[in-house]
Amino acid sequence: MTAQAPDHDVAVRTHPDSTTDGAEAKDPRPEPTAPVAPPRTDGWTSVCPLERLQPERGVCVLVDGEPVAVFRTRDDQLFALHNLDPFSGASVLSRGIVGDLGGTPVVASPLYKQHFALGSGVAVEDDSVVVATYPVRVVDGTVEVGGCG
C-alpha cells in the first residue's frame, strides 16, 4: 500500500510589480568547469598576492599542470615543493604542518608525518627520498613560482 500526497492548490508567487525582472533562475546543478591555469610570465607562474599566504601555512597551485605546495614560514621565507607525498602517493603536502627541526624549515606530511626540508625537498627520516623543489620569488607583491629545480 502506498500513500498518496493530497492534491493542493499551489500558490504562485509573483514579484510585487508583476514582473520577473531580476529574478533569473539559477541552475541548481551547475556543470563543473575546468580549472583555469594561472598566467605565466617569463617562465614564472603568478600564484597570488603575498599577503594571501599565511605564515606557517601552505597552499596548492598548478605550475605547468603540476600540483605545487607553496609555503610561507614564520620569518617570511617562501618555499615551493611538489605537492605529492612520496610515502603515501597522495597530493597533500600543502596541508602539512610547517615548522622547523634543528633550525631547518620543514613540512610534516599530514598522512604519515614524514618531514621534508623546505629548501631541498629531502625527507628528514629517509634522505634517499626527495621531493622536487621550485624557485619562488615576489614581484610587485605577487608570489611567483618558476619551473622545477
Image (cartoon, rainbow, N blue to C red):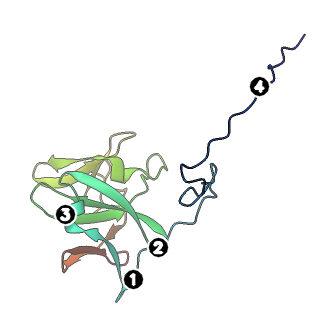
The disc label shown at residue 149, or none = none
| Chain-order first, disc 2 or disc 4 | 4
Question: What is the CA distance from the residue labelled 3 to the residue labelled 2?
Answer: 21 Å
Q: Which residue is mark 2?
A: 37
State if disc 3 and disc 1 touch (CB < 8 Å): no
Q: Which residue is mark 1?
A: 40
| Chain-order first, disc 3 or disc 2 | 2
Mark whose residue sits in front, 1 or 4: 4
The disc label shown at residue 8, or none = 4
Q: Position of residue 97 (x, y in %)?
A: 26, 45
Q: Which residue is mark 3?
A: 51
| Chain-order first, disc 1 or disc 4 | 4
Please name the residue shown 12% across and 62% down the image.
Answer: 76
Amino acid bearing label 3 = Glu
State if disc 4 and disc 3 touch (CB < 8 Å): no
Question: What is the CA distance from the residue labelled 1 to the residue labelled 2?
Answer: 9 Å
Which residue in the rendered view is the most extreme toward the bottom? 42
Query: Is any part of residue 112 visible from this angle?
Result: yes
Mark whose residue sits in front, 2 or 4: 4
Q: Position of residue 139 (x, y in %)?
A: 20, 80
Q: Nearer the viewer, residue 103 or 58?
A: 58
Please name the residue shown 29% across and 55% down the image.
Answer: 58
Amino acid bearing label 4 = His
Amino acid bearing label 2 = Ala
Rendered image quadrant of residue 127: bottom left
Question: What is the CA distance from the residue labelled 2 to the residue labelled 4?
Answer: 51 Å
